[in-house]
Image (tube, rainbow, N blue to C red):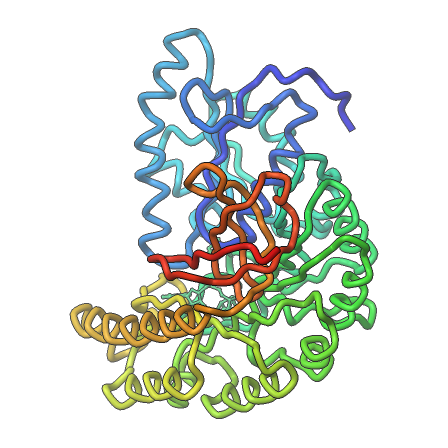
Amino acid sequence: MTEPRPASRKLHIKTSGCQMNVYDSGRIADLLAPLGFAVSDTAADADLVILNTCHVREKAAEKLYSDVGRLRPLKAAKRDGGGRMLVAVAGCVAQAEGAEIRARAPEVDIVLGPQTYHRLPEMVAQAARQKGLVLDTDFPAEAKFDFLPPTDTAPGVSAFLSIQEGCDKFCTFCVVPYTRGAEYSRPPASIISEARRLVQLGARELTLLGQNVNAYRCDGWGLGRLIGALATIPSLARIRYTTSHPREVDDELIAAHRDIDTLMPFLHLPVQSGSDRVLEAMNRRHTADDYRRIVDRLRRARPDLALSSDFIAGFPGESDADFEATMKLVRDVTFAQAFSFKYSVRPGTPAAAMARQVPDTVKAARLAVLQELLSAQQRAFNRASIGRELAVLFEKSGRHAGQLVGRSPYLQAVHADAPDAMIGAVATVRVTALGANSLAGEVVP
Ligand code: SAH
Ligand code: SF4
Ligand code: F3S
């Protein structure tokens, strides 16, 4: 590895998309630190700007081009001052659109896919030497994780840890299998050592990440066993994982929810639709009743388990009756929170070519109805917390002086008056009031 240099260059990273991109951006910063790059909150005067992008819906992908537009004057100002601002596009838009990005955004110097971050130092050196585009969107045989240096930036109270990447599911609406490649699970030993390091650096909660995190399989280990091993790390107070696929919920994982106290009783389990016809057209490979059964088993194992999910409104061919089946599933299961989206046509995916695309007005109307029900369920869930005592892991200062904010086991944000010394501690908080997006309460001495 290169000898550490004093920080002399400014690096700005803008991250969009899922938590995996957030994790990757952190690792990119770790990777570039020995080359003298120090992270800056603003792009102005930066020597290197990295846009870590998302391609999952059209709006997310278009954001890249408006972001690059905003960099144009900053890049010119840097040049006028005798310097050079390199602009790199990383992440899923880079993977999906490759060299086309250069045609639409000539300011871009480097395009690199999510699997080639470890090659970034070489690419930066190359881009500094030459004028044309430096592009690397391979799916290399080596795993990037093996080449990224161990982190030494303080991760904060709650840290992400990628354990699995890629997707072999090929849901017909989704770009992820094309942008992130095949499912790959990191070896348990390397995950456990990274987890220990994060805890040593101050993390009290780890969220294990993967596009299909519960498809984790390596050397005979599944996710349940891995969680069991991580739960033995002293001072690790909480473990979470996301995102899961219903098909991959196995007995071992359900047992982990029953047996492991540090595994939090909150699960993000996307279902997408409640109609079997639509689920089949989506290639989800589960029915609505399969989903209900999985939830029942999980709730038997862990009765207070709170659920979150993803929904798509207006998938091609979705009828009023199909949509009603989704509403019924939501009413049957009840969610503590959820994400819902209008179906967005993604070029190159099978659903983009399906007949009977749903008009935008219908998609919008269905989404509004669905979101109303989901928000009512979320409000009801939060309201039911009033008067209860919840274990809150304090993460940082709150909006007002003397106040901290943390999370309940069910991922609700909770504000309470407490000294800064309690950041990183789990305290019992009696919930007294409901805010717009959070709860407020008092620490129980
Ligand atoms: N791996 C995860 C989620 C990946 S993308 C999973 O399998 O659930 C996150 C969410 O974006 C998906 O769950 C889905 O609800 C939504 N999404 C993906 N492609 C979409 C599209 N073309 N249009 C609208 N929403 C989409
Ligand atoms: Fe996309 Fe489906 Fe894979 Fe999730 S499981 S990443 S929705 S293809
Ligand atoms: Fe977006 Fe790529 Fe994540 S498409 S959701 S950043 S895997």
Residue 193 in the figure: left or right of residue 71: right
Residue 103 picture location, percent across and down: 35, 37
Closest to the observer, 111 or 147: 147
Of 85 and 352, nearer the camera is 85
Q: Residue at x 54, y 43 (%)?
A: 396
Residue 166 in sight: no
In the image, farthest residue toward the left: 361
Q: Quadrant of residue 261?
A: bottom right
Query: In this orientation, which residue lies closer to the viewer: 401 or 192?
Result: 401
Give residue 152's quadrant in the image.
top right
| Rendered-image quadrant of the C terminus | bottom right
Decide if residue 369 is on the left or right side of residue 379: left
Q: Is residue 433 above or below residue 401?
A: below
Residue for point 81% across, 56% down = 233
Residue at coordinates 52% horizontally, 62% vertically from top-left?
430
Expressed as whole percent of the image width and height from the top left, the position of residue 206 reads 66, 55
- Against 128, residue 250 (above or below) is below
How many marks can you see?
0
Instruction: Decide: is 319 above or below 146.
Output: below
Residue found at x 76% / y 55%: 191
The quarter in which the N terminus is drawn is top right
Q: Position of residue 324 (x, y in %)?
A: 28, 87
Q: Along the line of sight, which residue is nearer the eye, 177 or 258?
A: 258
Q: Quadrant of ligand 1?
A: bottom left
Does residue 26 appear to the left or right of 272 in the view shown? Answer: right
In this rendering, the answer to whether 385 lies above or below 403 is below
Quick check: can you spot residue 151?
yes
Residue 105's x, y, as percent? 35, 35
Task: Using the rendered view, name the quadrant where residue 240 is placed.
Answer: bottom right
